[in-house]
Image (cartoon, rainbow, N blue to C red):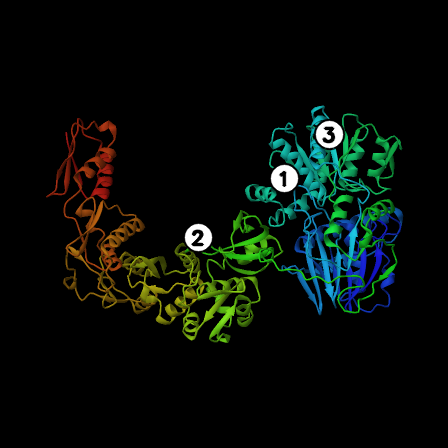
Amino acid sequence: MNITVLGGGNEVGASCLFIEIAGKKILIDAGMRMHSDNPLPALGLLEGIGTLDVILVTHAHADHIGALPIVHALYPDCPIYATPPTVDLMNIMMRDSYKLLEQRCRETNTLPPYTERQVTDLLQSLLLYPASGQLNLGDVKIQSYRAGHILGAVMFLIEGDGEKLFVTGDLSFKAGRTIHGAQVPHDVHPDVLIMESTYGNRAHTDRHTEETRLAHDVAEVVANGGFALIPAFALGRAQEVLLVLQDYMDKGLIPEFPIYVDGLVTPISRIYNQYPHYVKGPVAYRIKNNGDAFLTEGRCKAVTPKEREMILQGKPGCIVASSGMLIGGASSWYAQKLVADPRNAIFITGYQDEESPGKKLLNIADGIDTELELGGVAYPVKCRVGKYGLSAHADASEMNRFVQTLQPTYTLLVHGDDTAREQLSNLIDEKFNPMLVENGEKYPFEKRKSGRGVVGKRYRQQPNHALNDKVGGVLLYQEAANDPCKLAICVGTHMKTNTLVCHTLKGKQIKLTLLQVKEMVGYWNRSITELQSVTGEVLNFSRPVILELDWTNLSEGSYTFDELVQIVGAQTIQQQIAVALVAQALPASHADGRNVYLFSKELQEQLLSLVLPIQGLRLNANNALDHVRAYFDEHPRFIRCGADFIGTEKEQITIYFDFPDAISKQERARIAEVLRAATGWPVVFSAAVRQDLLQAALSRLLGQTVQSPSIHLQEKKVVVSEKVTDEVCAQFKELTGFDVQQKESANAQNSIASDMFQASTPSPRMENNLAIEEAKRWAAERNLTIYKAGVKQEAMEVHFISPQIAKRHEIELTELSYRIGMPVIYAKSPKQNEIIQLILDTVPPSWEVKKNPSLHVDRATVALKLSEQPLPEELQQIQQIIEQKTGYMLEVIV
């Protein structure tokens, strides 16, 4: 094993490690010295190595990614892996860094280290680190572990040919309010540990104390009429500061004041919001409830450059802005405006390079310097200056304990100045061989004769933990027996209760036992929003995804879930979820801590015909009907659709056309097939014809009103008195599927009065209660008022306000007969009380009604006694309204 330190060895900046292990060539990070005349790592040492096998990125800070555009240009075919949050953050950080570099090069008349095109090429080539946390590079296995520090930061364990190398990148065990601390792999004992040492000569002050100092000091400045500027690293530190200030406000520990967020802080905070499964529970809770954990309406506002002057002229508050060292960016602009006023303050919360304006500001506070140079101009400092320990790096004690836990054979200390590394080296036990590495040096490690590890290393086997294996996995679970399966992401374990800590796709935190977990579908490390978008429909409608897979490859036998996935060719997360749902419909046994699914020829036949009880084989009724309506959105014949009942379950979707005979059998079959594939529901078509629309359609074609046509449903024809041409007949046939015939004479009219209405086309008879409910729906769809519906002597009796109104709807009554599968009659008695009340509500108060109206059922009239005769026009208008609503003629008696 050979390790070459290209940068970030005896410094903080330009981190870059070249690793040779088991015949593979690996580069870890390629950062920049952002404030140096020599910004790049010693990339020239890579000359002559040939090709790189892989580039790994620990996290998205510029001192670890700033030189990657150059590396990618040198090795364009080399894959570059980073976690999904890191990739998202790099898209912001790299573009912003380039703007700053380009601006600085213009000011100094120098060349930028790379081009904007090279930045774009790099970002487009980034690959997402596998959700499982494991990357296989031939015989070399690379395992990632959470590093704390910032969102998406990871450490790497690299194993190959019996050797183990562990690289921490930047790490923090107490990462603060946003993310969890570093994941400590207790059973990994590497041959070589490469560990950062930024604060190797310090012990962090109590975090709570520092947060309290900061919150109260900011509140004090604002209360005295000043602005408190907090220059913060946009990635990580700014999010911590925003949560601290708002938490103290929420608890009433400090008064409310406005917080203004400027620079890169805003877009980076939005990325944090996309990864609730990466952050701490309280932050995930804020994301779920507010949609944003950091920007709060009415309190914490994102500011654009155009608004800056207005902010400083307004109400005093706190400004959280990038960059954290006052080197350009929004914070430098605000500092120039605020530094000369003693009411204002600048509070430093992070690491400061020796040559940075932030470090000089702290020197001024200590009496070392007198002026602060910003943007080439020297400013006298009169504002208040403070420093607070909110570090996202481990301190000396934590790093020493980490080494004690990992028990490496060799410990290489990087990413720190000489003082920090020397003091940390003295603290680490000699048996772990601490080494202070130098930039540009190569460190070879001799392999043991046994082939397992380097010289002096005792080989240990890492145990397997069933719970820990689930962390980062997408779990298919049931809260209780017979509940539908749901999805969650496992974010941790609770060993005392032997449970898994998970986030649902809606962001709710839950704990699951292993018994509730039906299957682990796979690993996921991208944003939870993306997981929602790609998997949201699978649980509700698995049919189309199941049909994508090749189930014919399965033969009789027993299979683990992973074997099922491989055999049927499930590659995407959606397909893997579908396989898991199918597996739940198969008989299962338990062996070696895994589900084993038993498969037979009979089950294969049931699966191929999709009759197994698989979750999501069809959409729920409402979604299915919405889909059908959308499908027919512009179809001229479509009227409505409904989910029909057989027994107590919805079995089929029925589609209603105004003129069903105008749709050919072939077209109906095609529609049914399309909708079955899109909804999972069998589709049938109602034979009911909208007879009322036949007359209207023929009138439109003739250009005149057709009087009382005779409709013969059985014969699919309409008989009319008017003359019709062959062209109209053809058009009517195409439009409705009905023929038109002219009556031989007026006496040929064939209208048979009947009080019972029955559809000529047979249909299944509904159960009585279901038929009553259907009658109510029928009336509501037609905007008809019926007062009662009931089954009477094997016929449905409906009650209108009067039989006169009922007779107006004979065609609709025939349709109701078809819908419920039984004859329909209407009540012969009027609703006298309802008629009387309707009349009293209709007549004007000025009419001065002397007594209640009197109904004459035999004449279908109603008498109303008044004091005076109404005006003729007014009387005629009221009579028309009452006749239209009741079927009764109003007679006025004075």
Residue type (three-letter) at the residue carrying disc 3: Phe
Residue 828 rendering spot, x and y as whole percentages: 14, 48
Label located before the other in sequence (2 or 1):
1
Q: Is residue 812 above or below residue 738?
A: above
- Badge 2 amino acid: Ala
Residue holding disc 1:
295
Q: Which mark is residue 227?
A: 3
**Circle 2 sits on which residue?**
480
Relative to 782, say whether 522 is above or below.
below
Task: Of the two numbered discs 3 and 2 on the same chain, state the one appearing first in sequence.
Answer: 3
Determine the secondary structure under disc 3.
loop
Tally of numbered discs: 3
Neighbor class of circle 1 (other Cα within 10 Å; few <14, some 14-19, many 20+) is many
Front residue (pair 623, 348): 348
Mark 2 neighbour class, 10 Å CA radius: few under 14, some 14 to 19, many 20 or more: few
Circle 1 — which element? loop
